[in-house]
C-alpha cells in the first residue's frame, strides 16, 4: 500500500511537472511570439513574459525581433544615361508583425532573406536608373538611399510583416571602360576649375600689383615733394648763413674760400694749372697780407 501510494504521488508530481512544462512558456525580451492551434494563428504578437498555453493542442512560435542584417549580392545597375555601375549594399530589417511574418515565411529567416533580396535589387535598380552617373558620384550616399528605403519599407510591412530600417551602400565601382571615361571627365573638370582659379589669381595679382604701383608712385611723389621742400629750406638756410657770415668779414670769407680752392686744386695727382702769374687766383700766395683795395 505504501509503495502504491508513493508511486501515485510520484506519478502525480510527474504529471503536474509535465503539464506545467507544456502549459507555461516564456517569451524573451528580444522576441515576439504567436500562438497556434493545429497550425492556425489564434493569438498574435505575444509580448515578452510568462504565458500559458494548452498542451498538445496549442503550439508557440517565437521570432527574433532584433535588427537583422542582409548582405545583398553585388549587382550591376544602369544609370539614366545607360552607363553601368557595380553596387555592393546591405539591408537592415526587423520583424514587426509576427503573424504576417509567419504566414509569409513560416518563420524561416532564410526564406525571408530570399524574399527581401529581389525586392531590394529591384528598388535599387529603379533608383539608379533615375540618376545620372554624375549625380551618383556627387550626391551623398545616405541621401541617395532615403527613397528606396521608404518605398521598400512600406511594401515589406504589407507583404512580409518586416520593416526595412535602412539600406546602405558599401561600395560603388565602375567598369573599366566607364571608369576611364569618368576619370577623363573628372580630370577635364578639374583642369577647367584650375584654369578658372589661375585666371582669377592672375587677375587679383594684377589688381594688387596695380594698386601697389599706384601707391608706390604716390609715395615717391610725396617723398620727392617733401625732399624738395626740405632741400629748398636747407638751401635757404645755407644761403642765409652764408650771407650772414659773408657780411661779418668779407675779406676773411674771401681768404677762406681761396684756401679751399687751393686745397681742392692741388689735392690730386693731376694738379697742373696753366695761369697768368698775376692771376687773381694767386692773390694770397704772392704776399702774406692781402692787397689793399
Image (cartoon, helix red, strand yellow):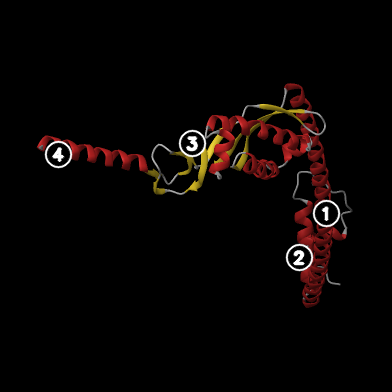
Query: In front: mark 4 or mark 1?
Result: 4
Q: Nearer the viewer, residue 174 or 255?
A: 174
User: Could you give the CA–CA distance between mark 2 and mark 3, rounded to whole angstroms?
Assistant: 142 Å
Dot 1: what SS?
A: helix
Mark 3 and mark 1 lie on one chain; the one further toward the N terminus is 3
Q: Do callouts 3 and 4 mark residues in contact (Cβ within 8 Å)?
A: no
Looking at the image, do the residues carrying marks 4 and 1 touch, with CB atoms under 8 Å apart? no
Residue holding disc 1: 213
Check disc 2 and report its element: helix, strand or loop: helix
Marks 2 and 4 sit apart, C-alpha to C-alpha, by 160 Å
Q: CA distance from mark 2 to mark 1?
A: 49 Å
Q: What is the quadrant of the C terminus in the image?
A: bottom right
Using the rendered view, name the quadrant where residue 164 is placed: top right
Which label lies toward us, 2 or 4? 4
Label 3, label 1: how far apart the Cα atoms are: 98 Å
Q: Position of residue 94 (x, y in %)?
A: 55, 42
Within 10 Å of disc 2 (Cα), the crowding (few <14, some 14-19, many 20+) is few
**Which one is in front, 139 or 26?**
26
Mark closer to the chain start, 2 or 3:
3
Q: Label 3: how many residues lie within 10 Å, few (<14), some (14-19) or many (20+)? A: few
Residue at disc 4, secondary structure: helix
Task: Give the CA distance from mark 3 to mark 4.
Answer: 37 Å
Along the line of sight, the residue nearer the viewer: 285 or 260 = 260
The residue labelled by disc 3 is 38
Judge left or right: residue 32 versus residue 152. left
Total tally of numbered discs in the picture: 4
Residue indicated by mark 2? 256
Name the mark on residue 5.
4
User: The N terminus lies in which quarter of the figure?
Assistant: top left
Splitting the image into 4 quarters, where does residue 158 fall? top right
Amino acid at each position: 500500500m505504501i509503495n502504491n501510494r508513493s508511486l501515485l504521488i510520484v506519478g502525480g508530481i510527474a504529471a503536474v511537472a509535465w503539464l506545467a512544462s507544456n502549459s507555461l512558456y516564456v517569451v524573451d525580451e528580444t522576441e515576439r511570439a504567436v500562438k497556434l492551434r493545429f497550425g492556425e494563428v489564434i493569438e498574435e504578437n505575444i509580448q515578452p513574459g510568462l504565458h500559458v498555453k494548452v498542451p498538445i493542442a496549442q503550439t508557440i512560435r517565437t521570432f527574433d525581433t532584433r535588427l537583422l542584417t542582409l548582405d545583398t549580392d553585388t549587382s550591376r545597375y544602369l544609370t539614366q544615361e545607360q552607363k553601368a555601375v557595380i553596387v555592393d549594399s546591405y539591408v537592415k530589417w526587423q520583424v514587426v508583425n509576427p503573424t504576417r511574418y509567419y504566414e509569409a515565411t513560416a518563420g524561416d529567416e532564410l526564406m525571408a532573406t530570399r524574399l527581401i533580396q529581389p525586392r531590394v535589387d529591384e528598388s535599387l535598380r529603379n533608383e539608379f536608373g533615375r540618376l545620372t552617373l554624375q549625380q551618383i558620384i556627387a550626391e551623398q550616399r545616405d541621401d541617395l538611399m532615403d527613397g528606396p528605403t521608404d518605398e521598400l519599407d512600406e511594401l515589406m510591412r504589407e507583404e512580409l510583416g518586416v520593416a526595412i530600417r535602412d539600406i546602405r551602400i558599401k561600395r560603388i565601382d565602375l567598369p573599366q571602360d566607364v571608369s576611364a571615361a569618368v576619370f577623363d571627365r573628372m580630370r577635364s573638370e578639374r583642369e577647367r576649375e584650375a584654369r578658372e582659379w589661375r585666371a582669377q589669381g592672375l587677375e587679383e595679382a594684377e589688381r594688387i600689383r596695380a594698386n601697389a604701383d599706384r601707391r608706390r608712385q604716390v609715395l615717391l611723389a610725396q617723398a620727392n615733394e617733401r625732399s624738395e621742400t626740405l632741400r629748398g629750406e636747407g638751401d635757404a638756410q645755407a644761403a642765409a648763413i652764408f650771407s650772414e657770415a659773408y657780411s661779418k668779414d668779407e675779406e676773411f670769407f674771401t681768404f677762406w674760400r681761396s684756401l679751399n680752392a687751393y686745397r681742392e686744386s692741388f689735392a690730386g695727382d693731376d694738379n697742373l694749372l696753366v695761369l697768368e702769374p698775376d692771376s687773381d687766383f694767386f692773390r694770397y700766395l704772392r704776399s702774406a697780407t692781402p692787397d689793399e683795395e
